[in-house]
Image: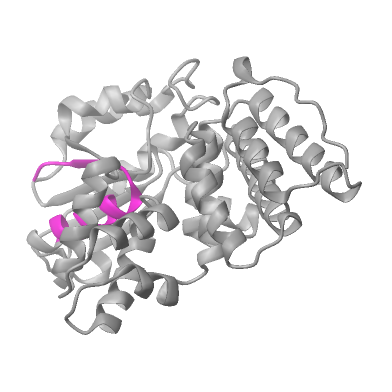
Amino acid sequence: MPAHLLYGDSFLVSRQLERLTGEAGADSLLEANRHQLTGGQFNLPELLAVSNALPFMDTCRLVIVTGLLATLESRGGRGRGARSIGEWDKLSDAIPQMPETTLLFLVDGPIADGNPLLRNLRPVTQAQHLQAPTGEALARYVKDLAQDKGSGISPAAIRTITDLVGNDLWTLDRELEKLSLYAAGRNIEENDIQEMVAQVREASIFNAVDAMIEGRPEVALRLLQRLRQDGAALPYIISMVERQLRLVCLARYWTDQRVSPQELPGKLGVPPFVARKTAEQARRNSWPDLDRRYRRLLEADLDFKTGRVDSEDLALELLVVDLAAPATQVRNRGRRRG
């Protein structure tokens, strides 16, 4: 049977893995014929020993390898200066020689195009790069997902939930499941989301930071203004943005140390889906950009605490614009004194 290489968004990878193994009848396999291996915890001979063994009293043997390609990512995550492929250079020769009864799945998160093992394995596997939708594609995805769960959803509700959750497909799936049950067959509306979506404030902060990192100040400001309208004071918003930036810095540090995706939640002290999204933010930030944003945030906090701002709304707007701007466009702003 062909080997499969699935990488990209963890939700889509997980669903595709579930679909393919189900179609192959792997759900009914004996436990002795099911193997889960994690990158960095085994070597090539160990993988081949499992993969070349014939199934015991079954039609096939399932081998799922998670995170192997990620161990060969470059420190910057962009494929430059990638680690040597070493012994794994032989895997591409070994895969076509594996028994027809072996179901081999190599699954990973986002992988750079320059990953050496990715280039090596593409010709001998059925490789699929599964990316989370964005923009209009994300809106269509949300609409279709709501319909699959038995509800329609209004355009305003789609915009609200994608603002709050972004393209975190795990969270979208979970929240739309709850919303469809709450709506009980009618259209999901914007008010339903405000009432039902869990941890709206934290999601708003997270996605506001995401929007700033991506240079979308209008989205970030809209999210943070909603918090202001709900009664959140500027110090609270600054503290939450600071918390997320601190997590991004820690995620950048640990990914630079080549900590595996499985270990990262424990290092950050957050749930896996938060660690996953924070690591994605970290990959899009250089250390100088993180330092600049952190310093600007501390400056805003000091301005407020010392009474140097006379309008929280204006201070928030200036902060968002500065945090979202590329480093080359940042200008020193004179501090307003009350």
Residue 26 within the magenta-colored segment of the rendering: no
Q: Could you tell whether 338 is left or right of 25 in the image?
A: right
Give the camera-side residue of 231 and 254: 231
Residue at 43% across, 23% down: 86
Q: Is residue 14 above or below residue 279?
A: below
Residue 20 within the magenta-colored segment of the rendering: yes
Q: Could you tell whether 269 is left or right of 53 in the image?
A: right
Residue at 50% across, 31% down: 215
Q: Is residue 98 above or below residue 115?
A: below
> Residue 156's x, y, as percent?
30, 59
> Residue 302's x, y, as percent?
86, 43
Using the rendered image of the protein, determine whether residue 157 is visible from the camera's viewpoint: yes
Question: Please, which colouring scheme is shown?
Answer: one colour
Q: Which residues are magenta?
A: 1-21
Q: Residue furthest right?
A: 306
Give the camera-side residue of 118 and 76: 76
Q: Could you tell whether 207 is left or right of 92 in the image?
A: right
Quadrant where the image shows the C terminus = top right
Give the camera-side residue of 53 and 217: 217
Query: Number of numbered discs present?
Result: 0
> Residue 102's x, y, as percent?
16, 50
> Residue 115's x, y, as percent?
38, 24
Using the rendered image of the protein, determine whether residue 260 is visible from the camera's viewpoint: no
Residue at 57% across, 22% down: 326
Q: Quadrant of residue 205?
A: bottom right
Residue at 74% across, 40% down: 297
Q: Is residue 149 above or below residue 274?
A: below
